[in-house]
Amino acid sequence: MTEEEAKIWLRERFSEACIDKLSKFVELLVEENTRQNLIAKSTIAKIWTRHIVDSAQLLSFVPSETKGSWFDIGSGAGLPGIVIGILDPNRETLLIEPRKKRGAWLHAVSEDLDLSRCRIVEAKIERLQKEKAGIISARAVMSLTDLVTSARPFSTNDTYWILPKGSRARQELSEASKPIQNMFHVEQSVTDTGAYILVGKGRGASS
């Protein structure tokens, strides 16, 4: 997918108001990247493909009737958390980021973009009160097994898990326990033929 194709993909699915906010977010992200390493510099030239559409596509794996908050674990650069907050503004999105400098930046971005339903949580997932998630995402955070183990207390049998895993998706799934393997399936990313997303539902527990 080229940068132009990425922008066309977004315009076909989302409003101009959303596209405007995404454009502002891109500007803020590129500017902040000169101060802290939020994304690899080598990916800036393909930021719409590698980061924006790569995050936005996750919405397509969540049925529209799904209720509950979206938990984005290790939100870092706001990917996918800020993107989800822009494109699904009626759902509460928790951006869970323990690093203080990144958390402060996420606070500033959510205010700048008027994302009133984005909540920045400056803590590790294990430190949260036992809220329940409707959807859990995590991009480049922990192995599949460690992630499910850490976030399981915040899930229910109806929770969706949307986990971009790049080229390692099938390998990580094969290394997981049977309950976790049975919970997930592999989906192709729209941005890269060599990248995959693990999509699951439930708690991944044996009992």
Image: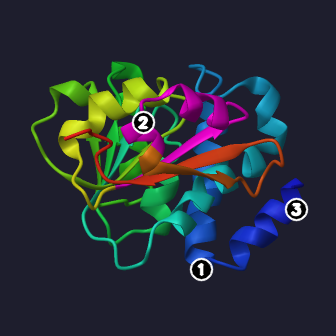
Tell me if mark 1 has few (under 14), some (14-19) or many (20+) residues whose alpha carbon lies within 10 angstroms of its own: few
Instruction: Determine if the magenta segment contains residue 30.
Output: no
Q: Nearer the viewer, residue 176 or 198?
A: 176
Residue 94 appears at what percent x and percent y? 30, 47
Q: Amino acid at mark 1?
A: Ser
In the displayed image of the protein, which residue is found farthest to the left? 129
Q: Earlier in the sequence, mark 2 or mark 3?
A: 3
Give percent across and percent down for residue 69.
Answer: 27, 58
Rounded to the nearest angstrom, the CA distance separating label 2 from label 3 is: 41 Å
Label 1 sits on residue: 15
Residue 83, which numbered label? none
Q: How many marks?
A: 3
N-term-proximal mark, 3 vs 1: 3
Q: Residue at x 63, y 27 (%)?
A: 33
The answer to whether 38 is drawn above or below residue 23 in the figure is above
Q: Position of residue 190 (x, y in %)?
A: 75, 58
Disc on res. 178: 2
Where is residue 106, by image quadrant? top left
